[in-house]
Amino acid sequence: MKRWHRCKGTGIRKVRDRFVDKFPLADGRVLEFVFEDFPQKVCSPCGERYYEAKDLIAAEDAVTRELMARGIRDSAVFKYLRKALGLKATELADLLGVTAETISRWENGHNEADLAVWAALHFLVDDHRSGLTTTLDRLRRLVEARIPKRPVPLTLARAHGATLEALADVDSGHVIDHQAVQAWADSLGTRKPRPPPRR
């Protein structure tokens, strides 16, 4: 039988109730993210609440999406996103071509990362959440650039009508989901390319 930590009671109720996740910014403000129908277990005698790990992970993912969607550039957000990637400061520093001390200054609010760094961080997090490593692989290739010692044989890829149409859609701004465009572009060299993305 399960017992609760505080009162050792056994009266457990499953409920769906309000859950507020508070995110402190570096300047002292606190962002509140509210989940109205969050699954919880409540101890009837003492009122202590417990949450399933999978639900907390889903809430963390939702907070990450919202922070990125709002474009909040704060040192606490930078550190949060790096940790969401599971990268050490030294690993991120290597990928971005800066020192670990620079990452520390960005995360502690002593210096501000520029927009290109924020964009790279957002792409990394988007890929990570989608189970992709596209941006990570590209950054690693830039860090570990290999200059060929011999001539490199290449072949011309023939663009099909759908490919040209999809490229025209991207150029004209009709495709807005960069992940779909990236996944499509990455699939072009495979045996089964994805269909062109649509709005």
Image: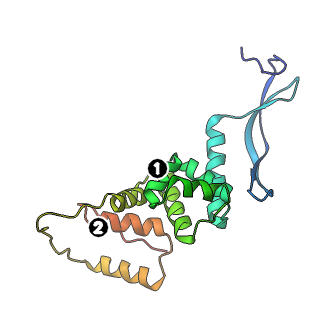
- Is residue 194 something that shows in the picture? no
Amino acid type at image mark 1: Glu
| Residue for point 59% across, 53% down | 104
Crowd around label 1: few <14 · some 14–19 · many ≥20 (10 Å):
some
Q: Name above or below for residue 5 compared with residue 105.
A: above
Determine the secondary structure under disc 2: loop
- Is residue 62 something that shows in the picture? yes
Report whether 64 appears left or right of 28: left
Amino acid type at image mark 2: Leu
Q: Position of residue 42 (x, y in %)?
A: 80, 30
Residue at the extreme bottom of the image, as rendered? 172
- Compute the Cα span from label 2 to label 1: 30 Å
Report whether 103 appears left or right of 56: left
Q: Which mark is residue 32?
A: none
Q: Which residue is mark 1?
A: 91
Name the image quarter holding residue 56: top right
